[in-house]
Amino acid sequence: MKNNLASSILALALLFFIGCQQKDKTNKPPSSGGGETWIQLFNGRNLDDWQVKIRGHSLGDNFNNTFRVTDGVMQVNYDEYDSFNTSYGHIFYKKPYSNYKLRLEYRFIGEQVEGGAGWAEKNSGVMIHSQSPESMAVDQDFPVSIEVQLLGGVDENEERPTGNLCTPGTHVVMDNQLIEKHCIESSSKTYYGDEWISLEILVLNDSLITHTIDGEMVLSYGKPIIGGAYNTLLAKEGQRLESGYISLQSESHPIEFRKIELLELE
């Protein structure tokens, strides 16, 4: 009787354990949703896998501790600056991509540093299809790239959408027309405060790029090529941009980034 009872208890315990394991597998969320494998580009602890390039300084020189990790977020901060002095900066992820979704959250904080341009207040960006940081000149302001421009509202009586398009050294096609204008506004609303805003960028090689703000697509275009203002790659004028690096901007207003992740697509 004791042996039978012990065997029954052991069998029930084993069934309970298996059931818990199966339940855990069923309820355990995928890496970031939908069974998709998202790559975490930022680990929330340090700037490993990222390279800093600031105008007037050599690659890897994080001048005045501009890019840093604070409380689990990547922060662009100017508290060690006396004046901005055109020190435009970018922090590049270590490898290029071609077909992917990139998503992150950002928010503007604090006040613009002394010496920043008027247009750069609450202004930053995510550069995609960018030239490599190694190929940038020491005094180069911006990499040849596609910029997903991030803006915050300054004057409550003036709309200032975010998720816009700017084209340093590039052109794109919209509605079957080559667009040579430097910046194109999106259809997003204006964000005036310091709330976190979600951004998702879809990049399909050189065929389609879309910007999505807080779940709403606000801009789409395609066929990016090298050319125009800020082009430092003159030998590649007219070349299609099929891949490139990803970087985050430093343009004189403090900003924070978090949950920076990427899904590679076939």
Image: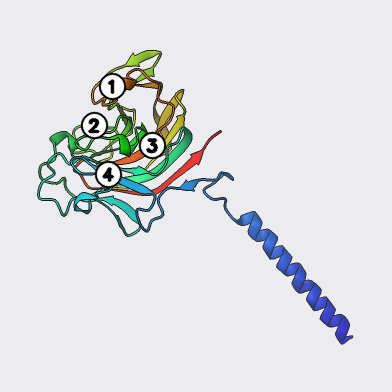
Residue plotted at (24% across, 35% down): 137
- Distance from label 3 to label 2 (Cα)? 31 Å
Question: Which image quarter holds the C terminus?
Answer: top right
Q: CA distance from mark 2 to mark 1?
A: 36 Å
Closest to the observer: 111 or 129?
129
The answer to which of 102 and 63 lies nearer the viewer is 63
Q: Quadrant of the N terminus?
A: bottom right
> Which of the pair 114/131 is nearer the observer?
131
Q: Which residue is mark 1?
A: 234
Mark 3 neighbour density, 10 Å: few (under 14) some (14–19) many (20 or more): many
**Residue occupying image coordinates x 15% and y 54%:** 80
The three-letter amino acid code for the residue at tag 2 is: Glu
**Numbered circle sitting on residue 245:** 3
Residue type pointed to by label 4: Leu
Answer whether labels 2 and 1 touch (C-beta < 8 Å).
Answer: no
For the point 32% across and 19% down, the residue is: 237
Amino acid type, residue under disc 1 in the picture: Leu
Q: CA distance from mark 4 to mark 3?
A: 15 Å
Q: Is residue 197 visible?
A: no
The circle on residue 159 is: 2
Label 1 element class:
helix
Looking at the picture, which amino acid does disc 3 mark? Answer: Tyr
Above/below status of 8 relative to 127: below
User: Mark 1 to mark 3: distance in Å?
Assistant: 19 Å
Q: Which residue is mark 4?
A: 59
Where is 231 relative to 149, above or below? above
